[in-house]
Structures are given as structure tokens and as C-alpha cells.
Image (tube, grey):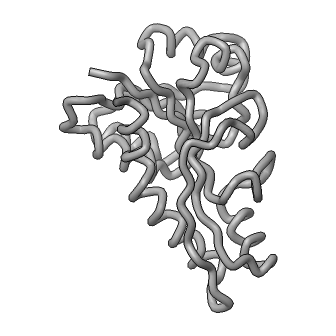
């Protein structure tokens, strides 16, 4: 049985979707959720599904405490599902090509520090983009610059708002993220 650790900072809808997808899977299980936000809704979502949660600080992340927690589990894959901090090199070095992230745009466009969630969707609408989508990529030491694993597009019309774009993106994330994770683990 392969082990997945999920990092999340917010509501945790992608984390919950991944947990549920693998709940009865013979392939893998989510064994831990890590969050940097003591008020994140992902905590309740994970606990409701009997998945342990650890809350950590920036110091814990950068000075090795989080790496110690990860090393105790030896995960096959680390999944960033709405995790907003830059991932530290000390963990990337120990788990090369075993850390992935989902980004709510078609990288390399609309990536980098500060480009997340509604910030991206507003920019897509303001720039009158004809399409947007999701990118699942490996994590390296730079925001949103790791090798691309998967992209899926969706059209954007003149009638779309940042909110309707967000709904379209959420649908793509829910549909594709768990399947891509399963493919990576097989």
C-alpha cells in the first residue's frame, strides 16, 4: 500500500477529494494531512475522514521538524493541494520527483509568488483570456516552475466572472487530480 501525505492551507476541498478517492483503494491511502493554518477548514475535513492532521509553523517547515514528520512516514508521494507557502529545498532534496502541486492556471502563465486562487481567476478575466485550466506539476525550489505532468483546459467566455472561472477550475481539479496521482503511483 503506497502512502500519500497532503499539504493544504485552506478549505481542503481538493484534499478531501483525494482522501475519498483513495479511501477504499488497494493502491494507496492518504496517511497524513499537514497544514500551516490552524484555522484551515482542511483540518475538519481530514478529521471527519479519520486522517491525522499536523499543524506546523514556518520555522517547523524551514528548520527540519516537518521533514522529520515526513521521514517517519516515508511517503511514496507528497501532494500540495492548495498549499500556499514555498516548499523548502531540504524536503525537495530528500524527495526528488515525489512532490507534486496543482495550480489553477495553465503554467507557465499566471504562476509564481502571489498567483493563487481568485488572484489568478481575476487576472484571467481581466486579461480576456480565451481559455484557462489546471496544471499538475512536480515541485522544485521555485514557485510553479517544476516539470509539468498534466494540463487540462477550459474555455473562458466574455460572460465569465472570476467566480465562474473558479467554479470551472474547481471542477477540473476534482475530476483530474486524484486520477493523475493514481497514475503517478502505478
Question: Number of marks in the image?
Answer: 0
Residue 62 image point, x, y percent: 72, 18
Is residue 9 at all visible to an observer of this figure?
A: no
Q: Is residue 170 above or below residue 18?
A: below
Residue 106 drawn at (x, y percent): 66, 58
Q: Is residue 86 above or below residue 81?
A: above
Tell me the residue at 43%/44% (across/down): 180
Q: Nearer the viewer, residue 14 or 34?
A: 14
Name the quadrant of the N terminus: top left
Furthest toward the bottom, the residue is 159
Q: Quadrant of the C terminus?
A: top left
Residue at 73% across / 72% down in the picture? 124
Question: 15 or 173, which is in the foreground?
Answer: 173
Nearest the eye: 85 or 75: 75
Q: Quadrant of residue 123?
A: bottom right
For the question of whether residue 63 can be seen, the reply is yes
Task: Classify residue 171 as left or right of residue 28.
Answer: right
Q: Is residue 181 above or below residue 163?
A: above
Left or right of residue 44: residue 160: right
Residue 70, image x and y in percent?
50, 15
**Rendered residue at 53%/34% (across/down):** 7
Left or right of residue 87, residue 178 in this image: left
Residue in view at x 73 percent, y 34 percent = 86
Instruction: Measuring from the top left, give residue 185's x and y in whole percent.
Output: 38, 30
Asked if residue 57 is positioned above or below residue 182 in the image, the reply reads above
Amino acid at each position: 500500500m503506497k502512502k500519500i501525505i497532503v499539504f493544504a492551507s485552506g478549505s481542503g476541498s481538493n484534499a478531501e477529494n483525494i482522501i475519498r478517492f483513495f479511501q477504499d483503494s488497494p493502491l494507496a491511502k492518504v496517511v497524513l494531512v499537514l497544514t500551516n493554518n490552524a484555522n484551515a477548514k482542511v483540518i475538519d475535513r481530514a478529521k471527519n475522514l479519520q486522517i491525522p492532521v499536523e499543524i506546523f509553523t514556518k520555522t517547523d517547515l524551514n528548520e527540519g521538524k516537518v521533514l522529520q514528520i515526513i521521514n517517519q512516514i516515508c511517503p511514496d508521494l507528497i501532494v500540495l493541494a492548495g498549499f500556499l507557502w514555498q516548499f523548502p529545498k531540504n524536503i525537495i532534496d530528500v524527495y526528488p520527483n515525489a512532490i507534486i502541486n496543482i495550480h489553477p492556471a495553465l503554467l507557465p502563465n499566471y504562476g509564481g509568488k502571489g498567483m493563487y486562487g481568485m488572484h489568478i481567476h481575476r487576472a484571467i478575466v481581466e486579461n480576456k483570456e480565451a481559455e484557462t485550466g489546471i496544471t499538475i506539476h512536480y515541485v522544485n525550489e521555485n514557485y510553479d516552475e517544476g516539470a509539468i505532468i498534466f494540463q487540462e483546459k477550459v474555455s473562458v467566455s466574455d460572460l465569465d466572472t472570476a467566480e465562474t472561472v473558479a467554479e470551472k477550475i474547481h471542477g477540473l481539479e476534482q475530476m483530474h487530480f486524484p486520477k493523475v496521482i493514481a497514475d503517478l503511483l502505478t
